[in-house]
Structures are given as structure tokens and as C-alpha cells.
Amino acid sequence: MVDKLKVNFGDHTLIMGILNVTPDSFYDGGKYNLTDSALKRAEEILREGADIIDIGGESSRPGADPVTLQEELDRVIPVIEKLKGFPIPISIDTYKSQVAEEACKNGASIINDISGLTQDERMVEVAKKYGTYIIIMHMKGTPKNMQINPTYTNVIEEIKEFLQRQANYAMKRGISRDRIIIDPGIGFGKNLEHNLEILKKIDEFKKMGFPLLVGHSRKSMVGILLGNVPPDERLYGTLGISAYLIFKGVNIIRVHDVKPHVELRKVVEALK
């Protein structure tokens, strides 16, 4: 039997399929915010070949307002409860420890914390208690204000320092090193120049020695590069970045469109 709590890292780039159960996410907001439609989408993500499914109940698009704890619980937990039999790991996209704990009780094995363990000090305790993986992401500011003129002296070094500091904090609190995943946070308090610098120097993050996740799918940087096109016209640009990241050996890519990425991965990995 496959241990769905274990994420099998290796030379193979894993595809994390996004399931937003929100009314206001930048690309698929409102599509899957009812339990039945969310379950259908989850089954589709599995059929299309995703290795992990990431479920979120609060939009983190630029300018988004936070939601209440109860609202987030009401959105995500009914879906996660019904995915207990899923044969792939379930990730909960939250920075609230209570949401993470309820998700883990119901079978989630990854906590995807966009705050990088800065918003809720209990998050590490929850990860330790349930033996889950923790994704530490870099974000400058909050979703509400992160894209208001973000500035860095050295974007790569500042992000690396933050990720290393937060990883050290987690390990000191009892999280095993092999349960930590890092994410430089494309589009979270970064402009186009910052995002391109991160991608061009992605090897710098690989050298840190933790599994590396990148989430670039249909984000504004893709839209800008393609001439300011809207999110629903950003698939091919997303695939271009994904091909590069797979070739570079990034461990996980977080994407909206699973099937095209599964096919892309087969071709790119054959060329490596």
C-alpha cells in the first residue's frame, strides 16, 4: 500500500494540483467553492495525474482581504473530510494553525504556510504533532499590501536568509529537516524583475538542501511577459516557465492545469 503521508522526492518533479475553494481567487475563484464541485475537481486533478493536491480556503491574490477562521474552516474541512480515501498526499494552504490542525486530523499530510511560519506560532506544534511536511514560503508583507512597491537590496540573498532562518526555527522546535520544503514565493511581494531574478537563479535555492517548490501558475508575471493578458490566457506562458523549472530539477511545481503539465514533464524529463 502506498503511504500517502510520504512525499517521494527524487529526480522526478512532482506536480501539485491547485484546488481553491474560494469565491475570489485570481484565476479560479468561485468555480469550486461548493463541496460537490470541489470534489469533482479534486477527482479530475487526481485523474489527470497530479502527485499532490493543495486545497486553500482563503485567497492570497494581491489585494485580498483575510477571511475569518470559521469561514475558512467551513470552506476547506468538508472537502478534506471527503478526500480521506485519496491515494495522493493532501496539502492544506493556510497560515492558521486551527485550520491546519483540523485538516491534519482529516488526513492532510502537508501544511502550505504562505506566511513562512510568521503568522501563527502554533503552526510548528501542529506540524510536529501530526508529523506533516511544512512548506515555508517567503512573502514580503501581506496579500493585502504585498504588491505596493516591493523593494529589496538583494532579492536572492534576502529570500534565502528568511527561508533558512525559518527552517532553523522549525527544526529547533522539533520539525525534522526532511519534512521542510521551501518556496521563494513568486509574486508575493515581488515585481517582475524580482520574479525573473528568482527564476534565473533558482539553483541558489536548490543549493540550500531542502526540497524546493515553485508556484508561478498563471500569475501576473506571466501576464506581463505576454503583453498584459488576463489569467485565462496565461497557460502557455506558464508552461514555458514550468519546462525550465522541470529541466532545472525543481522538486515540486504548484499549478492550476494538471494534464498539460503531466504531458510536459514526460517530454522534458526525457530530454534531461
Image (cartoon, rainbow, N blue to C red):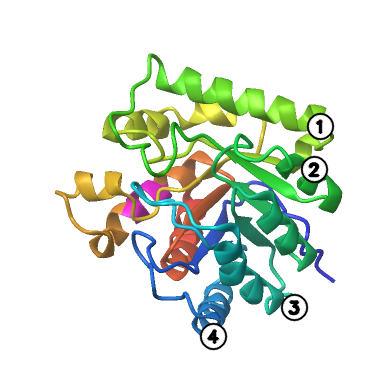
| Neighbour tally class for label 3: few under 14, some 14-19, many 20 plus, Cα within 10 Å | few
* Disc 1 to disc 2, C-alpha distance: 8 Å
The residue furthest top is 153
Assign a secondary structure to mark 1.
loop
* Disc 3 to disc 1, C-alpha distance: 31 Å
Mark 3 vs 4, N-terminal side: 4
* Disc 2 to disc 3, C-alpha distance: 26 Å
Does 94 appear above or below 30?
above
Mark 3 vs 1, N-terminal side: 3
Assign a secondary structure to mark 2.
helix
Q: Decide if residue 28 is in sight here.
A: yes
* Disc 4 to disc 2, C-alpha distance: 32 Å
| Neighbour tally class for label 1: few under 14, some 14-19, many 20 plus, Cα within 10 Å | few
Q: Which residues are magenta?
A: 238-243
Q: Pointer 2: what residue?
A: 125
Identify the mark at residue 173; answer none if there is no mark. 1
**Towards the viewer: 249 or 118:** 118
Q: Nearer the viewer, mark 3 or mark 1?
A: 1
* Disc 4 to disc 1, C-alpha distance: 38 Å
Type of amino acid at the residue the image marks with label 1: Arg
Mark 4 vs 2, N-terminal side: 4
Q: Pointer 4: what residue?
A: 36
**Towards the viewer: 184 or 199:** 184
